[in-house]
Image (cartoon, grey):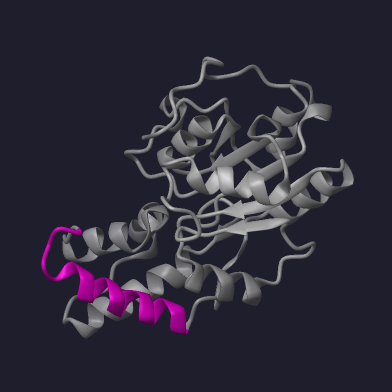
Amino acid sequence: MHQADYAAVLFDLDGTYADTAADMGAALNQLLARHGRPPLPPALIRPHVSHGARGLLKLGFDLTPEDPAFAALRAEYLALYAADICCHTRPFDGMEALIQRLLDQGLAWGIVTNKPGWLTEPLLAAMDPRPTPACVVSGDTAARPKPHPDPLLHACALLGLDPARCWYVGDDARDILAGRAAGMATLAAGWGYLGTESHPREWGADGLAEHPLAVLDWLAGDRPPTAPPSRPPRAA
């Protein structure tokens, strides 16, 4: 498909559009202090931010959602995060320039995140992105979050677009799974929260962009694909 056939680029939020690591990490360290544990260095926290509260509680407390203490600790963490949700959060360098270039080319942009709406909405309100996204889909907007395709299909419905006319950009394997299942072209965000155990070239994305502005090269067809063009079946 040529660039003229694409109509929108959709972005994951944490680790793709916005660098939220400092604020999410600060909330984790507040929680650790409350429970008599030492703080963790930002460099250790950063790779886990894309996994949200689940990943951070695993890092800080070695808890999984199956643990009896998980739900209460998650609620405590999210309350701390919500209280100071946008002290240091900013769009990644180059992101605002990328979005302006997309708009100049007549493409829409939007956010599709697994962050719940009660956090997504105040965060974006505080960030006040200009121009505003054409759509915002949170983790609780559709019936199922990523890696299911439901949020991306919902975004396409809001935009009135066929998924085949959209790209989805994200920094986690579930972003690529969701995008491919929805029938979109996908890019792995190489500038995101990729830890040592992340291997984005193995996610099956159509490409890997090392910087936000590199997304433009993929839209223009200037880069060879790094994954087969075939699409997997839709997620069940």
Q: x, y percentage for residue 229?
A: 56, 16
Front position in the image: 129 or 136: 136
Task: Kindly give the residue lying farthest to the left in the view shown.
Answer: 68
Q: x, y percentage for residue 184?
A: 60, 32
Front position in the image: 40 or 185: 185
Look at the picture and state if 77 lies above or below 217: below
Q: Judge whether residue 76 can be spotted in this image.
A: yes
Left or right position of 185 against 77: right
| Part of the protein shown in magenta | 65-83
Task: Work out which quarter of the rendered image holds the C terminus and state it.
Answer: top left
Q: x, y percentage for residue 84?
A: 48, 82
Q: x, y percentage for residue 13?
A: 55, 56
Q: Residue at x 82, y 52 (%)?
A: 100
In magenta segment, residue 170 = no
Front position in the image: 163 or 98: 163
In magenta segment, residue 80 = yes
Task: Work out which quarter of the rendered image holds the N terminus and state it.
Answer: top right
Q: In which quadrant of the rendered view does residue 79 lie?
A: bottom left
